Amino acid sequence: MTVEPLVPDAPPASESPRDDGLFAEALDAVADALSGATRAEDAFAYGRGTLQDAIYERAQADVALSVATATAQRLAQAVQSILNMQV
C-alpha cells in the first residue's frame, strides 16, 4: 500500500523576506523629500542656496507626493471594490 501526503490548497510558503516595512519606508522617503525641499527653500531665502536647487528639490517633492497620493487613491478604490462584493 502506498500512502501519498495530502497537499493543502494554500500556496507554498515563500522563503523571501517580508515587505512589512515597505510602506513605512515609502512614507519616510516622501517625508524626507518634503523636508529637503523646505531646507532648500529656506537656504535660498537666507542667501545660502540657489533658486535652481530650491526649485529642483520642490519639484522632486511634488512628484513624490503625487505618486504617494495616486497610490493611496488606488488602494482605497481597491479596498472599496472588495468591500462592495457580495458574498
Image (cartoon, grey):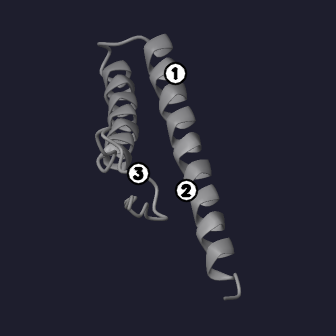
Q: Which amino acid type is marked by label 3?
A: Pro
Farthest residue, direction bottom: 87
Q: Which mark is residue 72?
A: 2
- Please tell me whether residue 7 is drawn above or below residue 80 in the rendered image: above
- Answer few, some or many: residues within 10 Å of disc 1's Cα (few below 14, many 20 plus, some between 14 and 19): some
Q: Nearer the viewer, mark 3 or mark 1?
A: 3
Judge by depth and name the residue closer to the eye, 16 or 5: 5
Question: How far is mark 1 from mark 2, CA to CA?
Answer: 26 Å
Q: Earlier in the sequence, mark 3 or mark 1?
A: 3
Secondary element type, mark 1:
helix
Cα distance between the residues tagged 3 and 2? 29 Å
Residue 78: give its label.
Answer: none
15 with respect to 6 (left or right)? left
Look at the numbered disc 3 and give the secondary structure of its residue.
Answer: loop
Q: On the rendered image, what quadrant is the N terminus found in?
A: bottom left
Q: Identify the residue shown where x is 57% and y is 50%.
A: 71
Residue matched to label 3:
12
Residue at left offset 48%, top offset 33%:
61
Disc 3 residue crowd, few under 14, some 14–19, many 20+, Cα 10 Å: few
- Vertical comparison of 31 with 47: above or below: below
The disc placed on residue 55 is 1
Residue type beneath disc 1: Ile
Compared across the picture, whether 80 is left or right of 23 comes to right
Do tag 3 and tag 1 residues touch (Cβ < 8 Å)? no
Q: What secondary structure is marked by label 2?
A: helix
Tell me the CA gap for discs 3 and 1.
49 Å
Residue 12, image x and y in percent? 41, 51
Residue at 45%, 21% in the rendered image: 54
